[in-house]
């Protein structure tokens, strides 16, 4: 393993080989970033929906449990989560699934040793470095929340792929972004769609992005809960790009699954009953009413996470239409 920090590795590579693609720059930076820290919460760099409120994970669990029941309650179903953070979403979802009589084995796709340790404190699971070791038998109930946004993007000016070099000691991209795509995202969603078409099950993707072919630059960095320069201090801040739901849907549909959505996250959560769940939580703990209302607003309001974030489902042939779409 190269002992140099990612910034020094990138500088050495560029000095030896010339500028690297934006995708390689992003991959190098994020691999180090996620492997070396817990990025979540007040002490981290950002907060995800499961950390805002238990309602988010619970409604995902309700969605999965309902779909599993209407699919005939297949005994061999497994819960799969991509990039499961601290394990908060899985914990809340599994609790809600138990209400539907579903208690599946848990399979977590996670490469960070720091986050694996936190997940192990929350729930029993089997961990995977990639998709290749996921079980081949039985339906898969897959969740990917704020996962695809962190996968590398390739950026282009016309037909020319943009690259990152070093000028005057700073990392610099060599042109203006006209289009961007994420080949790793498309390959991964296609592989998962093939698994669903063969094994049965469904996948729920929740992320921020657009639902039509996009143009322009969406690469961004977050550090300490504020936007930062993505070309400064690679490996010390979270690099993400908007998810192209249109492209993901096309790649998955080509493998034989049905697509539902994308729908704005706020619309989907409202359809799943977040208002009623918030009311029940507030009734059980009146002293938390304001906190619960604020969390619901943050998750669903169009000017917060309700519009930019989207929900999209991939459903295996022969499985029923999922709730909320």
Image: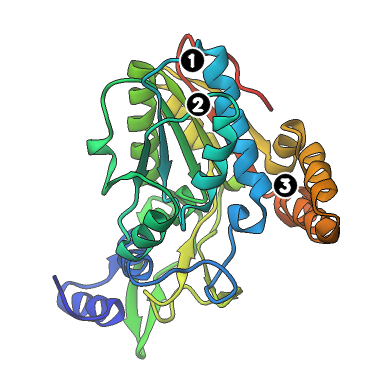
Question: Alpha carbon of mark 3 to alpha carbon of mark 1: how far?
Answer: 33 Å
Q: Nearer the viewer, mark 3 or mark 1?
A: 1
Element at label 1: loop
Q: Residues within 10 Å of mark 1 (few under 14, many from 20)?
A: some
Q: Position of residue 189 (x, y in %)?
A: 40, 35
Question: Alpha carbon of mark 3 to alpha carbon of mark 2: how far?
Answer: 31 Å
Element at label 3: loop
Residue, disc 3: 307
Q: Please tell me the numbered disc located at residue 102.
A: 2
Q: Position of residue 52 (x, y in %)?
A: 66, 58
Residue, disc 1: 73
Decide: marks 2, 1 in contact (CB < 8 A)?
yes
Decide: marks 3, 2 in contact (CB < 8 A)?
no
Is 309 situated left or right of 300 in this image? left
Q: Residue furthest front?
A: 284
Q: Residues within 10 Å of mark 3 (few under 14, many from 20)?
A: some
Element at label 2: loop
Residue at the spot x=38%, y=76% of the render?
A: 234
Residue 158, compared with residue 319, is above or below; it is below
């Amino acid at each position: 393993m190269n002992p140099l920090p990612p910034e020094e590795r990138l500088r050495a590579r560029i000095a030896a080989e010339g500028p690297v693609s934006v995708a390689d720059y992003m991959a190098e930076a994020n691999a180090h970033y996620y492997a070396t820290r817990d990025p979540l919460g007040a002490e981290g760099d950002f907060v995800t929906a499961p950390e805002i409120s238990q309602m988010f994970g619970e409604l995902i669990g309700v969605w999965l449990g309902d779909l599993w029941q209407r699919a005939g309650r297949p005994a061999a179903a497994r819960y799969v989560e991509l990039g499961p953070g601290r394990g908060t979403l899985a914990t809340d979802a599994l609790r809600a699934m138990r209400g539907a009589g579903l208690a599946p084995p848990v399979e977590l796709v996670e490469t960070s040793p720091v986050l694996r340790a936190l997940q192990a404190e929350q729930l029993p699971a089997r961990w995977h470095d990639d998709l290749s070791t996921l079980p081949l038998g039985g339906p898969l109930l897959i969740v990917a929340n704020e996962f695809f946004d962190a996968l590398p993007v390739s950026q282009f000016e016309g037909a020319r792929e943009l690259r990152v070099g070093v000028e005057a000691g700073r990392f610099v991209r060599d042109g203006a972004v006209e289009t961007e795509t994420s080949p790793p995202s498309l390959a991964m969603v296609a592989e998962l769609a093939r698994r669903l078409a063969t094994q049965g099950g469904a996948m729920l993707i929740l992320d921020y992005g657009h639902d039509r072919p996009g143009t322009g630059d969406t690469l961004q960095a977050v550090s300490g809960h504020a936007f930062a320069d993505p070309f400064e201090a690679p490996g010390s801040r979270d690099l993400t790009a908007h998810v192209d739901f249109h492209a993901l849907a096309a790649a998955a549909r080509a493998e034989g699954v049905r697509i539902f959505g994308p729908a704005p996250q706020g619309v989907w959560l409202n359809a799943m009953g977040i208002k009623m769940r918030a009311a029940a939580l507030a009734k059980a703990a009146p002293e938390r009413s304001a906190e619960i209302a604020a969390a619901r607003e943050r998750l669903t309001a169009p000017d917060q996470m309700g519009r930019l974030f989207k929900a999209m489902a991939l459903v295996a042939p022969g499985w029923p239409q999922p709730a909320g779409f």
